[in-house]
Image (cartoon, grey):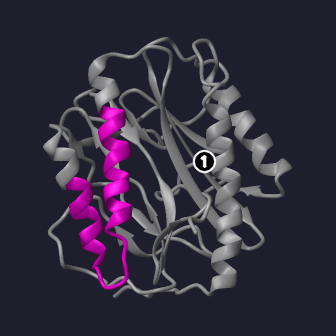
Amino acid sequence: MSRLVLKSPAEIEIMHQANMILRRTLAALRTRIVPGVSTGEIDGFVEKCIREAGGEPAFKGYPHPSGGAPFPGTACVSVNDEIVHGVPSETRELRTGDIVSVDMGVLYKGYYGDSAETYAVGEVDEQSRELLEATRESLQRGIDAARVGNRVSDIGHAVQTHVEAHGFSVVREFVGHGIGASLHEDPQVPNFGSPGRRERLVEGMVLAIEPMVNIGAPDVMLSADDGWTARTRDGSRSAHFEVCVAITKKGPQILGEPVEG
């Protein structure tokens, strides 16, 4: 059974500050992700931003789930058919027409933040543009379902319904999660499933909601080269967006973004 850890308003405020570091970094990357930049340069910029803001990179040195080498970067930088956990490299340069997702985490004043965005590198093809738009929209659908009284599965159902209506598929192997004083907490938050199931959403929960969406089939394969990078099995492109959301009586609060009055 899930062991839910509810957060106080003071804890949520610290997590809001933690996620603000990430949201600002992701916004700053929009003008820096250009043809010719290496994934290692992106990683270095992310680490600089996190440390200058008083945070610690949450992913650097993260233990491998199967006992392999710890994650070497500050950010997961995943290009084209790479879904998540792409290992940054100084020798891998982005090219016009690529899409690249940057996923990052921070530890700040004892609490974690986790956020991701997928970017177009220069001009991309129409299908890639549609993928990015549908994935971003599906995240918003999931956020809208993150309300007191709903169930965890209502989030995933909202994501899946929107994604599949656009002809894309949702990754099953990787899911969102609770977050707080630990990077990964209960409950798991799948991006698919029937509505009205799993844990009931209550005030004080904080969830990392993160749709991962493929142009082709949902099947995943792990890269043999680094033991971390997850790719689409059919080679189709994948997009990933993520925010942390606090469940409040007033509705879902996206941490790291301005609070509406």
Give the residue at the far front of this rendering: 261
CA neighbours of label 1 inside 10 A, class few (<14), some (14 to 19), many (20+): many
How many numbered marks are there?
1
Say left or right for 45 vs 65: right
Q: Using the image, determine if residue 33 lies above or below residue 134.
A: above
Q: Using the image, determine if residue 244 lies above or below residue 153.
A: above
Residue 159 is a magenta residue: yes
Q: Residue at x 75, y 65 (%)?
A: 108
Q: Residue at x 58, y 84 (%)?
A: 7
Q: Residue at x 68, y 43 (%)?
A: 25
Quadrant in which the C terminus appears: bottom right
| Foreground pick, 146 / 75 | 146
Highlighted magenta segment, given as a residue range: 131-160
Q: Is residue 60 visible?
A: no
Q: Is residue 160 visible?
A: yes
Q: Residue at x 51, y 12 (%)?
A: 95
Q: Which residue lies under the disc numbered 1?
A: 71
Residue type (three-letter) at the residue carrying disc 1: Phe
| Foreground pick, 123 / 97 | 123
Give percent across and percent down for residue 57. 71, 53
Say left or right for 217 vs 235: left
Say left or right for 147 vs 76: left
Give percent across and percent down for residue 182. 60, 73
Give percent across and percent down for residue 211. 35, 51
